Amino acid sequence: MAPRLQLEKAAWRWAETVRPEEVSQEHIETAYRIWLEPCIRGVCRRNCKGNPNCLVGIGEHIWLGEIDENSFHNIDDPNCERRKKNSFVGLTNLGATCYVNTFLQVWFLNLELRQALYLCPSTCSDYVMGDSIQEEKDYEPQTICEHLQYLFALLQNSNRRYIDPSGFVKALGLDTGQQQDAQEFSKLFMSLLEDTLSKQKNPDVRNIVQQQFCGEYAYVTVCNQCGRESKLLSKFYELELNIQGHKQLTDCISEFLKEEKLEGDNRYFCENCQSKQNATRKIRLLSLPCTLNLQLMRFVFDRQTGHKKKLNTYIGFSEILDMEPYVEHKAEPSKSQTRKPKCGKGTHCSRNAYMLVYRLQTQEKPNTIVQVPAFLQELVDRDNSKFEEWCIEMAEMRKQSVDKGKAKHEEVKELYQRLPAGAGLSKCFTYLIFYIQQHPCEWLQKWLDESTPTKPIDNHACLCSHDKLHPDKISIMKRISEYAADIFYSRYGGGPRLTVKALCKECVVERCRVLRLKNQLNEDYKTVNNLLKATVKGNDGFWVGKSSLRSWRQLALEQLDEQDGDVDQSNGKMNGNTLNKEESKEERKEEEEELNFNEDILCPHGELCISENERRLVSKDAWNKLQQYFPKAPEFPSYRECCSQCKILEREGEENEALHKMIANEQKTSLPNLFQDKNRPCLSNWPEDTDVLYIVSQFFVEEWRKFVRKPTRCSPVSSVGNSALLCPHGGLMFTFASMTKEDSKLIALIWPGEWQMIQKLFVVDHVIKITRTEVGDVNPSETQYISEPKLCPECREGLLCQQQRDLREYTQATIYVHKVVDNKKVMKDSVPELNVSSSETEEDKEEAKPDGEKDPDFNQSNGGTKRQKITHQNYIAYQKQVIRRSMRHRKVRGEKALLVSANQTLKELKIQIMHAFSVAPFDQNLSIDGKILSDDCATLGTLGVIPESVILLKADEPIADYAAMDDVMQVCMPEEGFKGTGLLGH
């Protein structure tokens, strides 16, 4: 079978020699590839997309022949979930909770602990009604003891192969996705359990943790001078054994108990000798618990990364551990082996074991039967009943799936043999159309796929604009027999049903026209170029856009390709999929916004544009040739007048530009020094030749200068807008002192003569002035400066408070961190600068406003309408920007810039600093303006960290190995262990 592209060419080869008006029924049948022969199964191994008669390779192979019943369903045998006889019940791993499951199983196998927990009274009085259980409510344990009771009862008598411990894990507040230290969990939970059971009245319950897990040892110190022995007794629940350098468990125990010499600066103060003496210190085991927990310290703390590192050392241990020599402390440390120890019978070797649990052997026969209380047994029986019901339900679902699959098997075997349509148009046939996205023959494939339900047939996706079969949809459809189509439509419904009458002659004729135009495009391009060389005389020409002429061949080719290859047309829904109407609307809108041929000389009113530089006159012959490719292009004969409305607007625009230039020139001449920023007065150095200075906002001056510089791009500024400098009560917002310092960038001082000119040129809403007066009758020595209007103290105070609040209520602001060594700032050029946030710094984000951009305070519309006054709120916002610019810290080389928020804690900042400087949080000493930052829970706002602050970092251990920097940079947040869980609640 030929490839799909060759099939398409063969189907339309006749169009090269046939005119559109000469298209016959035979040509239509050829275009729809009715002439192709059906494929033969066994010869054609995969489906031919271009052949509507090919019904091979659409999923039929799984149905033809004998089929295993298990392939008709995806339901596992529910009996696989059933507990096997004489086996233990497992626990579901909820993600990273294997350490919890391990200890639950260990504690469950401790019969004494299990029995003691069963004796704990239940507090669920609302659930227990006499000796029976409320059927309508699910049991929810309320305490840790009740959770353990229920879990142990299920582990003992459940019919399930495994049970879910999520209730227990949730009660402890553990994160199921975070791996935790198993040894730490064991310690904390035993402490919590002991504290909980200590409130019980029954001593067998109250003391069970100590009875089972508590031993005693003594720290023994012996003076070498007088031989005096001192003891410090201590209880233990586990022995923490160092495994570094050891291969056998006995070696680890020996090291734990070995003597330590106290000499030199570490000498021991002997109370008998009343002086410091050399001594020895050791641990002496006094008593061992019934259950001995040996914790192998596989995790050591790595100060560089702030995380624990696992040791994969092999440790050999026996099933029976003789501890008698160690209780008397007679054992000597043995040599450490360098290879994996050989494990004989009764011994084991592991590089992953982190805790070993040994039970004390006694002469008494152990009690292996622990009776589950009736209350708990009833709960277990109820859960077992639910499990049996589930097993029955799953078995029934399996049976239904098998029965349904067998029926489908018979249907497919019957229909597939009669699916192919007969040859030629003389036989009855029908078409099934189905849209494809990634797989061919989607509807038939879904019919042959037992895992998905078969939906109604939907042929709308393959209809053309004439509601007939689109020729380009042949590759995604199949032709089937009328017999098969009758069965499909009767069983699954859908439509429309397409027969031979659905072949679209209009589409075939249009395709024929397009193909002929594509073939003659190159020749016509040469012809048009020659015609454009001729001079157009009289009124015989037509106006064509120069841009359209430069790209007309490309436009024509794109247009023809679009008409020829638009296979994504759709009139609505596809098989089970609905077109996204919003997306299609947006696509159509984008297409409409693209200019078509000769639309580049259309004015906004749909007429001929007034600019002759954008168009060219071409001959009638050239226009006729172009019109063959662009029949809908706008036509403008040479005698057509330009748009009258555009001419009026052009004259008005020219008049406005001239007016703006005149206004700008007049204002520039009237206020030359203000425009050039020359000879400006200063409050801190008051000029001698005047006692009065006027004030306007610096914002007004900047906007006015923009207009004077570029009067054709900006509208005139007609209003001064001094209300922005006043409070709502009409009082001044600035003190004389502030206007000489931090607020000087917000105001502009005006000479009296300039003020008179400003009043003539602009609308002034409020007059603001500063008057200098001399105080005293004789030899005046004091000068006063009085503002009109006067200062409003309340609003001034409110403004200062708001500014301080803004500094402490920021988000995504930039601060800088300097690392120091020996109180000197250090430039770390070797480490690349990191910005932990994906956002840019404020300095990078600020951009200058383009000239002529509309401003909310000055409504500069092209129409010259009266501008709005600057509001108080708008000016405050502008004021904040100026304040932010004025206080910006200039970053120096080697400094780290970080993006932070006011509500961020100091601990979170330390994490950012760790990524930037590779210094662990516990090694960071931070300070700002001489103040030490030490409260990790405090927010940056409360600590006085404001935008542009510089924080000094002093590290306890500076990192010198930059070669290992990549490993350090991959460090995640330091571990918090079980912080925030129920294990620390007690």
Image (tube, helix red, strand yellow):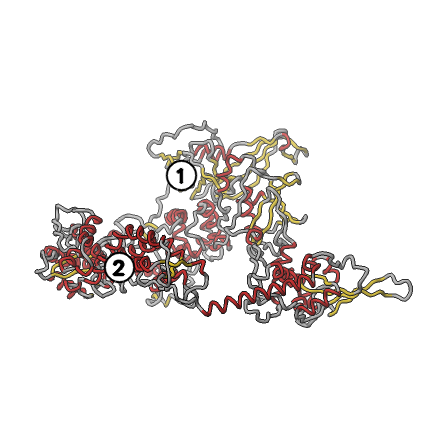
Q: Is residue 469 left or right of residue 890?
A: left
Q: Which of the numbered marks, if any, corresponds to residue 352?
A: 1
Q: Of the residues shown, which amino acid type is indicated by label 2?
A: Trp
| Along the line of sight, the residue nearer the viewer: 533 or 960 | 533
| Along the line of sight, the residue nearer the viewer: 429 or 592 | 592
- Seen at 48% across and 54% down, the residue is 981
Is 741 situated above or below 655?
Answer: above
| Along the line of sight, the residue nearer the viewer: 678 or 370 | 678
- Looking at the rendering, which quadrant does residue 691 occupy? bottom right
Give the alpha-carbon distance from disc 1 to disc 2, as whole Å: 38 Å
Is 305 situated above or below 811?
Answer: above
Question: Around disc 1, counting alpha carbons within 10 Å, would you say few (fewer than 14), some (14 to 19), or many (20 or more)?
Answer: some
Going by the picture, which residue comes out furthest to the left? 426
- Seen at 45% across and 31% down, the residue is 246
Query: Percent position (x, y) of residue 775?
Result: 85, 65
Q: Of the residues shown, which amino acid type is indicated by label 1?
A: Asn
Is 588 situated above or below 866?
Answer: above
